[in-house]
Amino acid sequence: MSNHSINLIYLLSATLFMLGIKYLSSPNTAKRGNLLSMIGMAAAIGITLTTPGLHGFTLIIIGIIIGTVIGGYAALKVKMTSMPEMVALFNGCGGAASALVAMAEFRGPNTEFDSFTLITLLLSMIIGGLTFTGSLMAYAKLQDLISTRPITYPGQQFINGAIVLVTLVLASLLFQDPSNTLVFFGILALSLSLGVLAVIPIGGADMPVIICLLNSYSGLAVSMTGFALNNNALIITGSLVGASGIILTKIMCDAMNRSLANVLFSAFGKIIESADDTGEGPTGTIKGYEVEDVATILANAGSLIIVPGYGMAAAQAQHATRELGDYLGEQGVNVRYAIHPVAGRMPGHMNVLLAEADVPYEQLFALEDINDDFAGTDVVLVIGANDVVNPAAKTNPSSPIYGMPVLDVEKATTVIVLKRSMSVGFAGIENELFFMDNTMMLFGDARSSLQKLVATLKQ
């Protein structure tokens, strides 16, 4: 096919990608959005295989088959609770692919590059490399393979800055001699190192932001690869991913009332002194209750707001949560769900889990849409959420989460908190909510506790 025909199909694919993103904005149209995006990608891949002068056709087909098998298996087998880890790996794969393509171009038979092509190849390799290792570190934190707390050491920012500076120096040397293999691999090694060192000082609470940022990086790397290869499909697709990723990053930062620089460099979540050491912790008494006590409160409630958090995901309690909500709804209780933007480990994590459990989308409300309703609610059931319901964000200027928009759950008549233990959240601080007079603590595994509550209510 002619280049004009190929570019026309690429344009059509890009349009389908944009429509896919548009439809993903609502659960009611998300399946259609996925389908359109799949059609767009299939068209882009198919038309690329007709490119005049394409070499290695057999290897490309083998690669497509291997990728299809791995991707299909992962999609079928991964649990919804592990979706953040899967997204992190996908980001890393995108970055690695861009870096590998740039490496192949650098090490190919043509070593004569114009300045623009050389810049885009370098950016593709550098951004792709740090996205790959950064995503692996994000995956390791999400999987608890390494500490979810910030990993810091003396002179950390100086070392990272030095790596960036040395990378720029080596890049200038490569401009003078693109065939210099030693300099080439030195840049690659530094970019891989920077990905690791940039992510390990970031705490688990900020993983939603980091996943969005790495997603944006992977798109930017793809776009740079597209410029280097003069491939319009890669340019457009990479730009879409990069733009949407950075917009979502901004949304996540706003949800925490923090800047991106604060997320990247503040080591948020580093363990701080205990309340006993500072004398500034919350005062009051933790009141633990039995399942029967909590069931009595729920049975007499007229309205209930359920606040899910990462603890619900960790316990895989989304189905038990829906079962409780459905039963109480059948008894005439007005049941709703309050979703904080950064609850969980990735944007929309709670929405995805509750959708998997078939919770009606009409019962899900964003923070800004439901926060005013807590004051008139009989019971709030907090399932594994911590920092996003901590009143210290509004009352304690010395708190690291001060200014962060949180759910006003403490204004309800009764607050029931399902929690495995009194361990602190990702911010590393005590939650004032747990010490309040209207708070009931039900300790134990969230799924087990919810199942026991449903059984008790049905008796």
Image: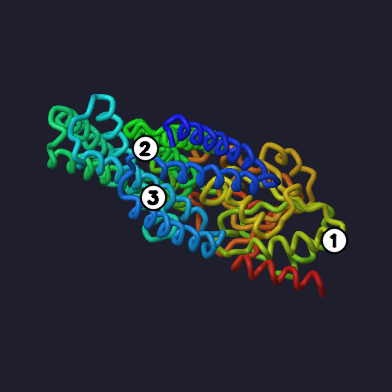
Secondary structure under the numbered disc 2 in the rendered image: helix
| 140 displayed left or right of 421 | left
Q: Looking at the picture, how far across and down is residue 252, in whole percent?
A: 53, 38
Secondary structure under the numbered disc 1 in the rendered image: helix
Residue appearing at x 46%, y 55% in the figure: 85
Q: Looking at the picture, how far across and down is residue 306, in whole percent?
A: 70, 53
Mark 1 or 2: in front is 2
Residue appearing at x 39%, y 54% in the figure: 61
Q: Which of 227 and 152 is in front in this view?
A: 227
Instruction: Give residue 291's quadrant in the image.
Output: bottom right
Measure the C-alpha gap from mark 3 to mark 2: 11 Å
N-terminal label among 3 and 1: 3
Q: Name the residue under label 3.
A: 93
N-terminal label among 3 and 2: 3
Q: Residue furthest bottom?
A: 459
Label 3 crowd bin: few (<14), some (14–19), many (20+), radius 10 Å: some
Q: Residue furthest front?
A: 1
State the quadrant of the N terminus: top left
Label 1 crowd bin: few (<14), some (14–19), many (20+), radius 10 Å: few
| 449 displayed left or right of 82 | right
Q: How was the colour assigned to the protein in this rendering?
A: rainbow
**Does 434 appear above or below 224?**
below
Q: Name the residue under label 2.
A: 221
Q: Name the residue under label 1.
A: 330
Disc 3 residue type (three-letter): Cys
**Does 200 appear above or below 286?**
above
Q: Nearer the viewer, residue 405 or 125?
A: 125
